[in-house]
């Protein structure tokens, strides 16, 4: 018992993957949303944190997870969606008594960085619009 919250030791030994698979099966969202969440977790979360028991999670594990996503060139909106799925699973684990606190809620944990701003669109005589923009602050010719 820590901070007055009881977590069943058997429940805390459930791995992230075991719990996430049950969480996915219990979702009541539309089929495409469930398939997307399952795919992101299976491809990116389970290989990295799937074997970790829920009771052993600390913010450092989530910071390392986010860093690994970014180091593997998984960034932008897709990485933020993966992180959101992991955070949702861990929030449900807190609700169900498998975890005392969601490590994603720690102030030291930051979600993956936002994607860079996209090109403001094609403008006449704008050569740069034929290739992806480097940043939204580039000078645009008109």
Image (cartoon, rainbow, N blue to C red):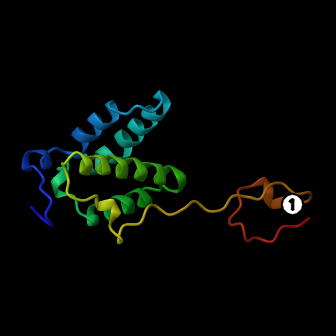
Image coordinates for residue 117, horizontal then vertical, percent: 66, 62
Image coordinates for residue 119, horizontal then vertical, percent: 74, 58
Nearest the viewer among 42 and 56 is 56
Image coordinates for residue 136, horizontal then vertical, percent: 71, 66
Left or right of residue 125, residue 63 in this image: left
Give the residue at x 37% y 41%.
43
Nearest the viewer among 86 and 102 is 102
Nearest the viewer among 103 and 76 is 103
Would you place residue 22 above or below residue 62 in this image?
Answer: above
Give the residue at x 47% y 49%.
81
**Res 65 → quadrant:** bottom left
Quickly name the residue at label 1. Answer: 126
Say which quadrant the N terminus sits in: bottom left
Left or right of residue 86, residue 95 in this image: left
Say which quadrant the C terminus sits in: bottom right
Give the residue at x 42% y 39%.
37
Give the residue at x 27% y 61%.
61
Image coordinates for residue 24, horizontal then vertical, percent: 34, 35
Sort mark 1 into few (<14), some (14-19) or many (20+) by Cα contacts within 10 Å. few
Left or right of residue 120, residue 74 in this image: left
Kindly state the secondary structure of the residue where label 1 is placed: loop
């Amino acid at each position: 018992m820590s901070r007055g919250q009881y977590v069943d030791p058997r429940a805390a030994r459930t791995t992230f993957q075991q719990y996430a698979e049950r969480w996915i099966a219990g979702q009541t969202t539309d089929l495409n949303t469930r398939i997307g969440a399952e795919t992101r977790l299976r491809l990116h979360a389970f290989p990295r944190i799937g074997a970790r028991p829920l009771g052993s999670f600390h913010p450092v594990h989530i910071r390392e997870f986010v860093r690994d996503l970014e180091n593997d060139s998984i960034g932008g909106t897709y990485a933020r969606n993966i992180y959101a799925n992991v955070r949702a699973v861990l929030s449900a684990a807190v609700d169900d008594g498998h975890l005392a606190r969601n490590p994603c809620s720690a102030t030291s944990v930051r979600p993956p960085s936002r994607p860079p701003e996209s090109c403001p669109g094609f403008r006449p005589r704008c050569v740069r619009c034929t290739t992806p923009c480097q940043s939204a602050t580039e000078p645009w010719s008109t």
